[in-house]
Amino acid sequence: MAFNFYIKVFVYPKIIRVSKPFLSMKNLFYLIALAVAIQACNQPQNQNTATSNQIIVNGVADKAYNGQSVMLVNQSVTQRDTAEIVNGHFQIKMPFKQAADYRFYGYNQATNSNSETHYDVLVAQPGTIAIKADMANLEKSVVTGAPDNDLYQSFLKSDAEITQQIYRKLAEKYGKDYEKHFESADPLYKEVMAYYEKLASALNANKVEFVQKNANSFAALYMLQDKDGELDSVTRETLYNRLSNKYKQTPAARFVINKIRAENVTALGKPAPDFELADPSGKMVNLQSFRDKYVLLDFWASWCGVCREEKPNLIKTYQKFSDKGFTVLGISLDHKKDKANWLAAIHQDKLEWQQVADLHSPENKAAILYGVTSIPDNILVGPDGKIVAKHLTDENLNKKLQELLSAK
């Protein structure tokens, strides 16, 4: 049996007409299959759906912000992409490299160092994410389509609730102005601190529970990085070892591992790891050269407002004890592009002690060696090269030096 007809094969924008008398059934099926395949290939892809190795952020914002830019930044590799808000919508596309903390910025906030408002989004796998952006306050933005982000937000909510409970109990027992008792000179200081630490154990328990319940998630690993300063070294290492290996090749895991290693080698009483960095003239300075004095390793940066606000007090401490065997070694976490600002800050703040930097922030090798993840921070090293104290406030530094150098 044969047919005499034609078939239309739609290949936009043309129509191909195939005409042949006595077309066999076998060839008919072949042409139909070919037509279906060609048409499928020419279907436009859904521009709102991510591929297997891509992140797409589909966002909405108030139309009042039309024409403004938004930006998504992968914090671990400084990977970024921007988009313009058009008719209340925007879309950002980015290759997915690894699970990470992605920061969502309004353009002005991202480029103005004095305005760092952003919204953190944990992304553990490629896919499509939706953001309802609150451009007036990005921290109030709403994200959907990122399961690990949802998981971590639930943890932050429980953490905040426990913190508020602690504040309420302190106020009930010591009054609304309970914070005044946190000064070491206050008569109730020891009592209030002991009570606070008892209450704060609930925060630690919440972190432990979160990791135990979500050991296979990126959110659990990220919590160890994000809440780094709230965990003691033993708890941090114990929790890290409970995590699955799924995300242990990510930058977040390397951060936690470096912190664990640094704390193991910089415990009180252990020899301070030596390092060598350049001073402003380019001369190399190493820690070993300070072996005859107590030396405070002062980690700071020209862009760190809090660091610079504390400098007048440190200058007074330096002048008080410098002739008794005490000195300071300033270690800047400035970047190469900030070198001029670093040099200007040394001059403007009238810093009298030696200053060094490698200008590779945030990969400063001394900071990594000592596990410094935020500034200002400091470590006191004795004349024998051993670590005497860490994370000292101005008041505690003065007390410690008075105790150590009172006989001199």
Image (spheres, rainbow, N blue to C red):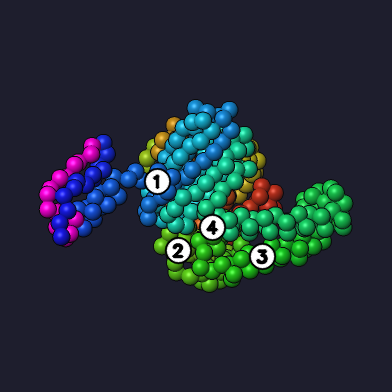
Mark sitting earlier along the chain (1/3): 1
Q: Residues within 10 Å of mark 1 (few under 14, many from 20)?
A: few
Residue 402 percent across, percent down from the top left? 68, 53
Q: Amino acid at mark 2?
A: Tyr
Residue 144 sits inside the magenta stretch: no
In the rendered image, residue 74, in percent from the top left (x then y), is placed at 45, 47
Q: What kind of residue is marked 3?
A: Asn
Dot 2 or dot 4: first in sequence order is 4
**Magenta segment range?**
14-28
Task: Identify the mark at residue 247; answer none if there is no mark.
Answer: 2
Label pair 1/4, CB-CB below 8 angstroms: no
For the residues labelled 1 and 3, the Cα–Cα distance comes to: 42 Å
Mark 4 or 3, which is nearer the eye? 4
Q: Are marks 1 and 3 in contact (CB under 8 Å)?
A: no
Q: How much space separates mark 4 and mark 3, taking CA atoms? A: 20 Å
Query: What secondary structure is found at the residue carrying circle 2?
Result: loop
Q: Residue at x 17, y 59 (%)?
A: 25
The mark nearer the N terminus, 3 or 2, is 3
| Label located before the other in sequence (1 or 4) | 1
Foreground pick, 180 / 172: 172
Judge whether residue 406 can be spotted in this image.
no
Q: Amino acid at mark 4?
A: Pro
- Which of the two discs, 4 and 3, labels the residue nearer the N terminus? 4
